[in-house]
Amino acid sequence: MRSESIVFAVAGMCFGVILGWVVGVQQSGQTQPALAAAAPAAGAAGAAAPPAPQLDEARVQSLMTVITSDPENAAATLELANTYFDAERYADAITWYEESLRIDPSNPNASTYLGISYYYSGSTDRALEQFEASLALDPAHTETMLNQGIVLAFGRQDLEGAQEAWQQVVALAPDSPEGQAASRALEGIAAAGHDATAPGG
């Protein structure tokens, strides 16, 4: 499965431009639907959306064969969910992440990617609820915190909450890919001229 989470996709764009747009939305009191926040900034940064990856049909068929013979195989259902996620087939990914968690409810990775899939499907609230469930399983799960910050920033225009989530990631794992991405996000907030934790921020 791809190692990228939401923020790694966004990090290819200009964080200052993206978060500057979010700051403007926040200050103007506008409300935006989930997923809309990143789109204008992506256009402003001159980044065209790449085509959706192709679904690995052979892998899907292979995994379905395993699942048909062993319906309680959590690893196979999780891998099938990941395969759909990688192809940006989020509705299918949700179905199989939920099934994987039914079989093995203790997996924070499956829970977190279920939350990401909810977000990409337009359900900000469900995404944030799922991230809370992930953190209940593993309070130090930095990938969850990283994505929680992105959804708070872009789905809720809650820069204070986003900043707090990213600061936790940096405090827990500053040299990890998640920590480095969180640092870039925090730098983006600073570049946008907004400190959400400052008085009046």
Image (tube, grey):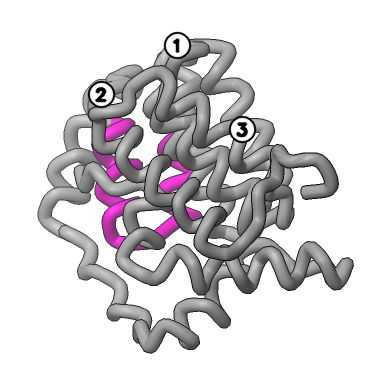
Give, as a three-letter code, the residue at label 2: Ala
Question: Mark 3 or mark 1, which is nearer to you?
Answer: 3
Give, as a three-letter code, the residue at label 3: Glu
Of residues 34 and 73, which is closer to you in this image? 34
Q: Which quarter of the rendered picture does the N terminus lie within?
A: top left
Of residues 182 and 192, which is closer to you in this image? 192
Say if 133 sits above or below 56 in the image.
above
Q: Say whether disc 1 or disc 2 marks the residue closer to the N-terminus.
A: 2
Who's the residue at 36% across and 46% down the image?
5
User: In this figure, which residue is indicated by the disc labeled 1?
Assistant: 106
Who's the residue at 57% across and 82% down the image?
40
The answer to which image quadrant residue 90 occupies is bottom left
Q: Say whether disc 2 or disc 3 marks the residue closer to the N-terminus.
A: 2
User: In this figure, which residue is indicated by the disc labeled 2?
Assistant: 75
The answer to which image quadrant residue 141 occupies is top left
Q: Which residues are magenta?
A: 77-98
Can you tell which mark lies on residue 164? 3
Mark 1 to mark 2 CA distance (whole Å): 13 Å
Crowdedness near tag 2: few (<14), some (14–19) or many (≥20) residues, C-alpha within 10 Å: some
Q: Position of residue 164 (x, y in %)?
A: 61, 32
Mark 2 to mark 3 CA distance (whole Å): 33 Å
**Tag 2 near tag 3, CB within 8 Å:** no
175 left or right of 107 in image: left
